[in-house]
Image (cartoon, rainbow, N blue to C red):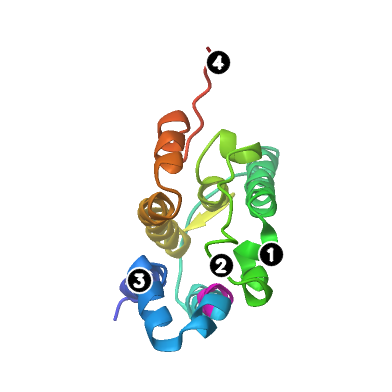
Amino acid sequence: MPPTLTLILSALLYAVIHSLTATLTAKARARQWLGPFAERWYRLTYNIFAGVSFLPIMWLMATLPDQTLYSIPLPWAIFTGVGQLIGILVIILGIWQADALDFIGLRQIFSPPSPHNRPELVISGLYQWVRHPLYTGGLLFIWLTPIMTRNSLTLAIILSMYLVVGAHFEERRLRHEFGEAYATYQKQVSILLPRFRKKE
């Protein structure tokens, strides 16, 4: 099998599995099968699985034949490096502002969601500019790499598609969880790219 096709199929398989396990249907099925155990451990297990299952793709990136498409020379590479650093900081800050313990899945272990203990909709900080700053930061990091190879371009395209599609799946989940409050938020803040305009 050609290296590019191998990488495409592997990345698509990862994206499909990762997306399906994040759906409301998958979570409901886990609650049906596992009861309270699923409420406590689903998020942490999901994150661990997402990280571990991405390792084979990183292995393919390191071992498959590749070809450099372009390399940004100094000093311009410094600017792309700064852009990637900004992307990483956006991701870290976004996780922090959204409650890092909840995002990782540790808070649910000790305080599982209930009608009396529901997460709050975060609309401040980075979330007042875009609804999904983690995805925005991810796209910055992916596309501002100073060295682009055939394999990294392939993975960048697939991951970008995955992030955009994943954002819309996340929208459905958040609309289901927060109802009209999230619908109002959707009208006020863009999904991935900030709208710079004067407040009325």
Q: As shown in the figure, which amino acid type bears the numbered disc 4?
A: Lys
Mark 4 or mark 3, which is nearer to you?
Answer: 4
- Of marks 4 and 1, which one's residue comes earlier in the chain? 1
* Three-letter amino acid code at the position of disc 2: Pro
What numbered label is drawn on residue 142? none
The quarter of the displayed image where residue 95 is located: bottom right
- Label 4, label 1: how far apart the Cα atoms are: 33 Å
SS state under label 2: loop
Residue at 34% over, 76% down = 6
Image height of 61 relative to 177, above or below: below
Please state the horizontal and vertical placement of residue 8, each as a whole percent of the image.
34, 69
User: Dot 3 corresponds to which residue?
Assistant: 20
Q: CA distance from mark 2 to mark 3?
A: 21 Å
Between disc 4 and disc 3, whose residue precedes? Answer: 3
Residue that carries the numbered disc 1 in the rendered image: 101
Magenta-highlighted residues: 42-50
